[in-house]
Image (spheres, rainbow, N blue to C red):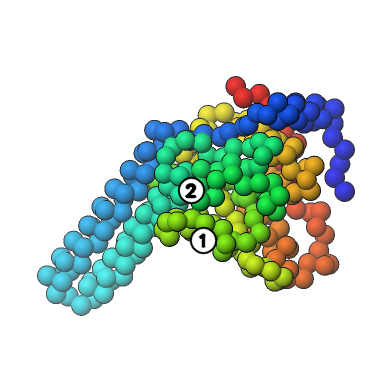
Amino acid sequence: MSRAKTPEEERRHQSWRDFFARGERYDVHYLPERWNAIVRRNVVTAVVTIDAAVVLVAVLVWWGRLGPLVLGGVLAVVMAIYALMALRTRAMLMAQSGGVPGFTLGVSDEGLHTPVQGIGTIAWSEVLGVFLVDDHKKVDALRASRGLQGAAARFAAKNGSNSVSANVVLPDGKALRRRIARRSHRGVVQTWAHHDGPQFGVISFALESATDTSDPSAMPRLGLALTVQCEGRGIPTRLDDDATRFAEHMMRISNVFDYSGVDATAAGTGADSTGGQSRT
């Protein structure tokens, strides 16, 4: 049973209800310069890494020593995998954004507005849950640390690594994937097992790497906007500081595991505890 709202929380909720009642829509936008930088860096990273792997193997073949050649071959494979990961990060950003740095995600009475080509606006009747994960504090601490680990985290951030996301749960992941014309973009829809029906689909929208993070209240505002839209429709929505509770929720609704003896109320707090309707 959820706790009663405080007067301040009720005021914020009512402010958003009035906002949507006027037919308005709340959008989160990409920053074009950051979006373009990530797209460019991932291509450069992939090209440089592949070139370095080819040069490494060529030098070791020329040298002719078996031991270094084997070790160098393993390193070259790792470098090739990293290059493919960089290209996949780019492809997923292109898929999530529709190929242009416009809006990331929109919320209105009509539904969830996405720039994903083939998906577009998702009616609320199709949505099974919306889960916001904001892990930036832990990740920021890692990025600020010294040494190789911190340097790697900072490099990954510049290449699109993300610690803040909105995860939209939908009833049929495979059918959703088929709506996306470009096969290379279909991976934007993740599938989760469902014991009693088609696999669930989850679209995760990155809300840190290419969006404006200068306003610390942006995520709470998005969470509250989603909560107001979902609460009257019986759609679960949460704002958590790590992805484990979202994964636990997905395992619960999949019916693959028996959670009958587990307390379902222990999984964090709702998305309605903070945030306001101000868009400034």
Is residue 160 visible to the viewer in this orientation of the structure?
A: no
From the viewer's perspective, is residue 81 above or below residue 155? below
- Residue 257 lies, in percent from the top left, at 73, 71
Q: Earlier in the sequence, mark 2 or mark 1?
A: 2
Q: Is residue 58 left or right of residue 155?
A: left
The residue depicted at 65 percent of the width and 28 percent of the height is: 24
Dot 2, crowdedness within 10 Å: few (<14), some or many (≥20)? some
Residue reaching furthest to the bottom:
66
The single residue placed furthest to the left in the displayed view is 62
Residue 180: x percent and y percent? 49, 55
Q: Which label is found at residue 178?
A: 1
Q: Quadrant of residue 280?
A: top right
Judged from this view, the residue extending furthest toward the top is 280
Label 2 residue SS: loop
Disc 2 marks which amino acid?
Gln
- Left or right relative to 135: residue 9: right
Instruction: Locate residue 275, reporting x and y percent.
Output: 69, 31
Q: Residue at x 28, y 56 (%)?
A: 49
Residue carrying label 2? 117
Q: Is residue 123 left or right of residue 7?
A: left
